[in-house]
């Protein structure tokens, strides 16, 4: 792809909102595997506040690039360097903010490597100031730890970021780059985006505490949340220390959500004694906290970037409806989502007046498309296709399958079928998601579609412990790693076999992160189900994970409680750790792991490989140098997919 080809967007090819998909009878030969394993050609899009310009994070043959255009005029076309780009947004009509991350060695901390984020200011003004936020300061480390909004104050654009202070004498703290981090705790800074000059506006918490803030429309700290690590005692206060709410949660599951409508209240979330997430709203003027959106599952919230106030949310569950507070915004979104019915449609960005909206769609017949919607004109212009080599005819049908676990719990999963084969007695790949606090939806999934393009049915079960349903379903996974969470996956396989869609004798299990753990458990804790297992960045030993996570957190008491709640009693970890049961592995295992993984360390795959070797069980280990937990680099992602496909086709041929 060339940058010019993506500019066919140039906001020209108009697509009427009600244009139907064309019917396709037979699929052509599938694209090469790299078309699936490559990073998408467009990774993020943002629209300027005035709606006149768009900024994109793109992939080209030369790597990631940042393209900023105004109509047909290109304002910026620059390489992003070796950084892993996480997001792009507009600070004002002349300034773009780029969020990146890198795996960094930090000396003196509990872990040797951390994934640290940074924010770069990209000015489009002639002679404007560009550079890394905190990059000009000798007193703040060059990394951003949390984003707290963009405000316009006195005609100037001000950004609010979390930052770590440096000891300018270099005598205390831990080494980070060229400075000494004083204590590693986060303070709140306001940064003049025009000059990149920071000023601390709220202090870091005392030792053993965590702190968060909400910033109001005027740029003032509106509310402060403090949590004590030792006992989970928490308080929400005004800057002058007047208390708005308090409580105790030993696992620290308390959060500031947003300011309420008009910025006159605080919305916060807690987890109650029954494990249910509850939101409350309390006036800034003081008063009794009242329930907010009780009995409504919320998947995502939308916040006014100029005020910090919540303006809408996307519900969890089957309908996943987007609800906006402003009736005009609600009407506009309802029309947009109706026009894209049948596809997964996500609201990505919008102008303050909601006249222009960026949405992303995917699903059956759609490998990922970005649109700029002109609300008044009721038209959508294609900005870019994520994977132009994967056309509508190449995308396998996607649907949701409801089924019941062995103990009667209702659940579902996402089924992706080959685009050109009858859905009968197909070879199948079980593809459990990571997290495990996550869930799969019926959108385009590059990994699932890659398998489907080669003739496999792919099932992504939303086992107990997944999000997307109610809190009881999420907590039904507590203590069930390797137990009911695992049998939920094989219960999904049994359901597909009962319907005649798949041949249960031709099944493999593949997954990443928690899904990698489930893949290993599928051939060690379970027997006789799968012809092979592929674990990408998977957990092999729960005791090792528990000890590592605690050590790297500085032995946080809250984290220890969270882990024990999710994993159960540490005394039982060995009996659900695939490493400890390697001798029972009844199918070949492929282990793939990035060496820069800071979430599930590479050592987890090393110890599993050693255990399989000692037990004389067939395995392969593929190390990905320079790769992180999320497969952020194009070449290593393509290699992962190629190795996985080779292994699966060897042990479970599609025909």
Image (tube, rainbow, N blue to C red):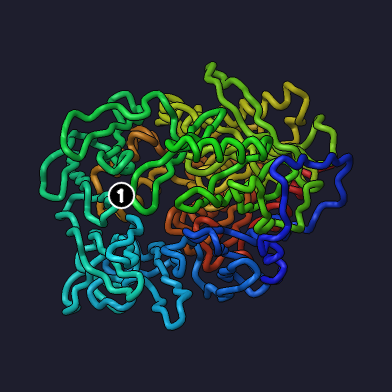
- At a point 65% along the width and 50% down the height, the residue shown is 618
513 on left or right of 365: left
Taking the image as drawn, is residue 161 in sight?
Answer: yes
Secondary structure beneath dot 1 equals helix
Q: Quadrant of residue 220?
A: bottom left
Q: Is residue 651 left or right of residue 85?
A: right
Total numbered circles: 1
Looking at the picture, tell me which residue is in the foreground, 319 or 304: 304
Q: Residue at x 61, y 49 (%)?
A: 360
Residue receiving disc 1: 550
**Left or right of 63 in this view: 269:** left
Q: Is residue 616 visible?
A: no
Q: Position of residue 582 (x, y in %)?
A: 54, 43
Image coordinates for residue 229, horizontal then vertical, percent: 20, 45
Quarter of the figure that contains the C terminus: top right
Residue 4 appears at what percent x and percent y?
70, 71
């Amino acid at each position: 792809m060339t940058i010019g080809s993506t500019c066919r967007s140039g906001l020209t090819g108009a697509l009427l909102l009600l244009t139907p998909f064309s019917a396709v009878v037979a699929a052509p030969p599938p694209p090469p595997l790299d078309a699936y394993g490559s990073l998408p050609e467009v990774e993020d899009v943002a629209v300027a506040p005035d709606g006149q310009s768009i900024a994109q994070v793109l992939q080209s043959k030369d790597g990631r690039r940042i393209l900023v255009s105004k109509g047909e005029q290109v304002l910026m076309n620059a390489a992003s360097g070796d950084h892993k780009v996480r997001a792009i947004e507009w600070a004002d009509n002349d300034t773009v903010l780029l969020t990146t991350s890198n795996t960094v060695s930090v000396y003196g901390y509990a872990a040797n490597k951390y994934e640290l984020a940074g924010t770069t200011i990209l000015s489009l003004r002639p002679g404007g100031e560009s550079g890394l936020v905190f990059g000009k300061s000798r007193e703040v480390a060059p990394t951003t730890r949390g984003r707290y909004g963009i405000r316009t104050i006195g005609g100037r654009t001000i950004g609010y970021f979390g930052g770590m202070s440096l000891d300018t004498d270099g005598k205390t703290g831990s080494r980070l780059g060229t400075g000494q981090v004083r204590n590693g705790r986060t303070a709140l800074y306001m940064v003049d985006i025009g000059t990149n000059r920071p000023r601390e506006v709220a202090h870091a918490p005392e030792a053993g505490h965590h702190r968060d803030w909400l910033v109001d429309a005027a740029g003032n700290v509106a509310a402060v949340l403090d949590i004590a690590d030792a006992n989970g005692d928490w308080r929400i206060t005004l800057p002058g220390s007047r208390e708005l709410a308090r409580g105790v949660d030993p696992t620290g599951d308390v959060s500031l959500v947003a300011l309420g409508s008009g910025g006159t209240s605080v919305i916060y979330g807690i987890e109650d004694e029954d494990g249910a997430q509850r939101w409350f709203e309390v006036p800034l003027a003081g008063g009794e906290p009242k329930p907010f959106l009780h009995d409504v599952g919320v998947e995502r919230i939308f916040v006014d970037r100029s005020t910090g106030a919540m303006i809408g949310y996307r519900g969890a569950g089957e309908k996943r409806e987007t609800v906006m507070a402003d009736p005009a915004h609600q009407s506009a979104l309802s029309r947009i989502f109706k026009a894209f019915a049948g596809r997964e449609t996500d609201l990505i960005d919008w102008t303050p007046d909601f006249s222009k909206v960026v949405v992303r769609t995917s699903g059956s017949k759609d490998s990922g498309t970005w649109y700029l919607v002109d609300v008044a004109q009721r038209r959508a212009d294609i900005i870019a296709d994520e994977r132009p080599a994967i056309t509508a005819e190449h995308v396998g049908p996607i649907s949701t399958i409801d089924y019941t676990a062995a103990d009667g719990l209702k659940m579902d999963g996402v089924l992706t079928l080959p685009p050109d084969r009858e859905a009968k007695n197909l070879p199948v790949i079980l593809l459990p998601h990571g997290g495990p606090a996550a869930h799969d939806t019926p959108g385009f999934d590059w990994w699932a579609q890659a398998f489907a393009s080669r003739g496999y049915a792919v099932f992504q079960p939303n086992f107990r412990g997944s999000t997307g349903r109610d809190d009881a379903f999420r907590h039904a996974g507590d203590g069930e790693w390797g137990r009911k969470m695992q049998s939920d996956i094989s219960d999904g396989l049994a359901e597909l076999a009962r319907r005649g869609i798949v041949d249960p004798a031709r099944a493999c299990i593949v997954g990443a992160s928690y899904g990698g753990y489930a893949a290993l458990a599928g051939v060690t804790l379970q027997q006789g189900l799968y012809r092979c297992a592929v674990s990408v960045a998977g957990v092999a030993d729960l005791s090792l994970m528990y000890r590592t996570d605690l050590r790297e957190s500085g032995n946080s008491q809250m984290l220890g409680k969270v882990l024990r709640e999710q994993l159960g009693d540490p005394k039982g970890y060995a009996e659900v750790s695939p490493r400890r049961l390697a001798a029972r592995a009844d199918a070949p295992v492929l282990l793939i792991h990035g060496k820069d993984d800071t979430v599930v360390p590479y050592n987890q795959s090393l110890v599993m490989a050693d255990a399989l070797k000692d037990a004389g069980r067939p395995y392969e280990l593929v190390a990905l140098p320079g790769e992180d937990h999320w497969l952020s680099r194009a070449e290593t992602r393509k290699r992962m997919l190629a190795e996985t496909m080779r292994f699966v086709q060897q042990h479970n041929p599609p025909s």
